[in-house]
Amino acid sequence: MTKRIFHSICIVAISVFLASILLFLIVLYNYFSEMQKTQLKMQLNLASQGAVKEGVEFFEELDISDYRITWIGRNGIVLYDSKSDSLEMENHLEREEIQQAFSEGAGESIRYSKTLMERLIYCAKRLPDGTVLRLSTAQNTLFTLAFGMFQPICIIFIIALILSLVLASRLSRDIVKPLNELNLDHPLEYGYSEILPLTRRIAAQKCQIREQEEELRRRKNEFEAVSTGMAEGIILLSEKTIILSINPAAMRLFSADCACVGKYFQAIHRSLELQELLQNARDGKHAEIVMELNGGNYQFGASPVFSGGVVSGVVLLILDVTEKEKAEQMRQEFTANVSHELKTPLHTISGSAELMANGMVPEKEMAKFANRIYIEAQRAIHLVEDIIKLSHLDKGASDLKREEVDLCALAEETVQTLFSEAEMSNIQIKFSGETAFVYGIRQLLEGIIYNLCDNAIKYNRPGGSVSVFVKEEEGGVKLLVSDTGIGIPKEHHERIFERFYRVDKSHSKEIGGTGLGLSIVKHAARLHNAVIELQSVPDCGTDITIHFPISLYKNFTQS
């Protein structure tokens, strides 16, 4: 702005100066022209009086180097000329000033020379005898006058230019200085009346901007509060996939930090699948993909953000579907396992019944087939009951009564019910412990002890042993079931509590069971906030410890 004001002042000053010089030359030229005409007329009057009294002899005695005197007769013939031979001159009757003199008594005219550098002024006067006396003189033109004054004009122009530059610089600085020192926080405090409308508008816009900033800050804080607490990842991208915002969940997923804001999305991940997903969103389409990342399965959803009908950004929402995928896989496996486990006893029952119905079973074998049908039917019933139990546990078992249970007494009772089964398998089962109370669901606690002991007997060796121990410890109650059985390889430790999972399927078929016992144990322990600890060495045995927290009893007694 300072430069524009400076240039404007300089242009105005120079223009005014040049216009003034031109006007001055014109006025000065006109003034001297009029003075010269007046003087020429005075000289003509004096010359005419001399010509009347003395004739041509009067002109021969005069020093008339600056003037030209011409005497013209009534017929236009030149009688005398001070500069040329009168006999060689043409007739002057048609000259303008001569005609005016004949008709009006006096006349004048102006004619330019061939070079246009000067002009000739003619004044004529009719004498009493009817002849005309004419005086003329040369006068410089305006161009000649300006050319003659070129040097002083240039000097004056340079001085004026320097003054204009200095004054323009100071004036532009003085004009802009108050604007540069304008306090934008309080624009109305400035007393520059010429810009008062501007300062008022600045103040109004500043107030509006302040309100908009507060609104944006409030919305930003709300968005950050919501996105920070989200388990899902969310990333806001510009139309060029520059990261505008990223929440902590997305940072953890991509191993990024806040420094990635303002960078391209490719800086934190270069997957071609995600690039195609973002491109679809930039084209105005919603797109989703599920891909594996950092050992988990994630669903990426990209949605375009429109502004004025044009895509101005992209919202990338990231959902962790690992558990969902696992649950779906487990559901499929569970369905397949249930179908498989039920198919075997049902086929056996169906086949045996069909043989019996067709009379293909000898009388002496009839009891054997009936017993087989009974055993397989019981197997199917136990499987269905275990499935129902698991479904019940999945729903939280909220209909079951919670009470104070002596875990030691309950474990002892359960062990006694398994004495006959252990004796049949040539397994020694023993119990030891001390009184320890747990506030929980008696049926589920009994199921935990029974399933652990039943597995310890089934997967033991002939002549082996099973030990059950209950003790109150610091922070809770401990239940330990230990056996000297075949053990579990370490690679199976993580999965033995899954439904229908068997370490050795061939061995499991021999000993029977539904394959849901340990799953029931896991779900029942979870409902009691208990922690399961597994220690097992192949061919040496297995120890399964369940720690019931003391807070379990306190929380329920307080409630």
Image (spheres, helix red, strand yellow):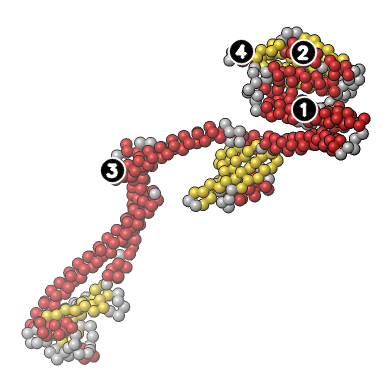
Q: CA distance from mark 4 to mark 2?
A: 25 Å
Contact, CB < 8 Å: mark 2 with mark 1? no
What residue sits right under mark 2 in the picture? 413
Q: Secondary structure at mark 3?
A: helix
Which three-letter amino acid code belongs to the residue tagged 2? Answer: Glu
Nearest to N terminus: mark 2 or mark 3: 3
Nearest to N terminus: mark 3 or mark 1: 3
Q: CA distance from mark 2 to mark 1?
A: 21 Å
Q: CA distance from mark 2 to mark 3?
A: 101 Å
What residue sits right under mark 1 in the picture? 382
| Mark 4 closeness class: few <14, some 14–19, many ≥20 residues within 10 Å | few
Across and down, in percent, residue 557 comes to 61, 12
Q: Nearer the viewer, mark 4 or mark 2?
A: 2
| Mark 1 closeness class: few <14, some 14–19, many ≥20 residues within 10 Å | some
Nearest to N terminus: mark 2 or mark 1: 1
Contact, CB < 8 Å: mark 3 with mark 1? no
Q: Secondary structure at mark 2?
A: helix
Residue 261 falls in image quadrant? top right
Which three-letter amino acid code belongs to the residue tagged 3? Answer: Ser
Q: CA distance from mark 4 to mark 3?
A: 80 Å
Q: Nearer the viewer, mark 2 or mark 3?
A: 2
Which three-letter amino acid code belongs to the residue tagged 1? Answer: His
What residue sits right under mark 4 in the picture? 557
Q: CA distance from mark 3 to mark 1?
A: 97 Å
Residue shown at 18%/70% (left/top)? 34
| Mark 3 closeness class: few <14, some 14–19, many ≥20 residues within 10 Å | few
